Image (cartoon, helix red, strand yellow):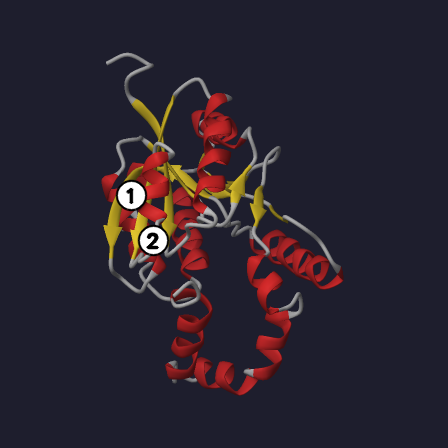
């Protein structure tokens, strides 16, 4: 099978009622795919969608599969299972990638030095509280090295760690830790893109205010303490409201 025929990169997009954003996400991937000389497939995993997400995704050339779980990790894992590419890249439906992303992912993995990684995050607009969020993200990523946002690794690496860790929250950090550990055992590093980044959607801030996550932490400090002690009922309710039911 020639270079032009086989799929080199599969981009997985989990999507729950994302008819307003899915087209622009796919278009950003297509712009990036034009800079990459290999073949790219785009897989949209429609999660409990009741809108036109699937139709719009198909009209924009994406492969569409369906999932009914209330766990983003399981949604991503279904996309990985359906992928044909040797390299997996994931991105959320309301976000976008920069045009050199796929080429850079491929080049980094081709060096043999890296097991995979994430990407720097830049908001699509800025204000003082969003700059505060940005700085906290940079500090967190810098201290831990557990970059997320856009995840990328070879499919067999995801398979080796059992895919994304199937929990409702912090699945990105848990998965990054597993990839980092798996890579260390092979003498490879978990890293981040240098020249490209994730363009992070501000739609929740647009809807609920730029201080959104700071307010959530302040208003729910008791719930977070209970969750740390093992009572996650309040946390599960908040996660459903902010993520799994946000577009209902």
Residue 36's place in the image compared with 193, above or below, is: above
19 w.r.t. 187: above or below: below
The answer to which image quadrant residue 221 occupies is bottom right
Of residue 160 and residue 60, the one placed in the foreground of this image is: 60
Badge nearest the viewer, 2 or 1: 1
Q: Secondary structure at mark 2?
A: loop
Q: Residue at x 59, y 56 (%)?
A: 202
Q: Contact, CB < 8 Å: mark 2 with mark 1?
A: yes
The residue pinned by badge 1 equals 80
* Residue 59 visible to the viewer: yes
- From the top left corner, tell me how far across and down residue 134 is, in percent: 67, 56
Along the viewing direction, whichever of 186 and 104 lies nearer the viewer: 104
Q: Quadrant of the C terminus?
A: bottom left
Lateral position of residue 41 relative to residue 34, left or right:
left
Label 1 residue SS: helix
Residue at the extreme right of the image, as rendered: 128
Q: Residue at x 44, y 17 (%)?
A: 37
Relative to 32, residue 152 above or below: below
- Label 2 packing within 10 angstroms: few (<14), some (14-19), many (20+): many
Look at mark 2 in the image and give the residue it sits on.
164
Q: Quadrant of the N terminus?
A: top left
Label 1 crowd bin: few (<14), some (14–19), many (20+), radius 10 Å: many
Question: How many dots with numbers?
Answer: 2
> Who is closer to the viewer here, 147 or 22?
22
């Amino acid at each position: 099978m020639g270079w032009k025929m086989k799929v080199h990169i599969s981009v997985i997009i989990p999507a729950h009622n994302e008819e307003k954003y899915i087209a622009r996400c796919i278009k950003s991937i297509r712009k990036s795919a034009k800079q990459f000389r290999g073949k790219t497939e785009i897989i949209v995993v429609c999660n409990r969608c009741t809108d036109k997400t699937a139709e719009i995704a198909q009209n924009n050339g994406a492969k569409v599969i369906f999932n009914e779980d209330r766990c983003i990790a399981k949604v991503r894992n279904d996309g990985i299972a359906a992928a044909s590419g040797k390299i997996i890249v994931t991105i959320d439906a309301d976000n976008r990638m920069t045009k050199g992303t796929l080429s850079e992912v491929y080049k980094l993995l081709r060096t043999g030095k890296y097991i995979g990684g994430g990407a720097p995050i830049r908001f699509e607009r800025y204000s003082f509280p969003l700059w505060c969020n940005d700085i906290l993200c940079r500090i967190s990523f810098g201290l831990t090295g557990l970059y997320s946002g856009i995840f990328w690794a070879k499919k067999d690496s995801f398979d080796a760690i059992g895919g994304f860790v199937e929990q409702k929250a912090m699945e990105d950090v848990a998965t990054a830790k597993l990839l980092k550990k798996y890579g260390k055992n092979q003498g490879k590093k978990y890293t981040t893109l240098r020249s490209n980044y994730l363009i992070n959607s501000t739609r929740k801030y647009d809807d609920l205010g730029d201080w959104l996550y700071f307010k959530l932490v302040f208003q729910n400090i008791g719930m977070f303490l209970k969750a740390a002690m093992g009572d996650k009922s309040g946390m599960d309710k908040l996660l459903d409201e902010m993520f799994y039911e946000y577009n209902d």
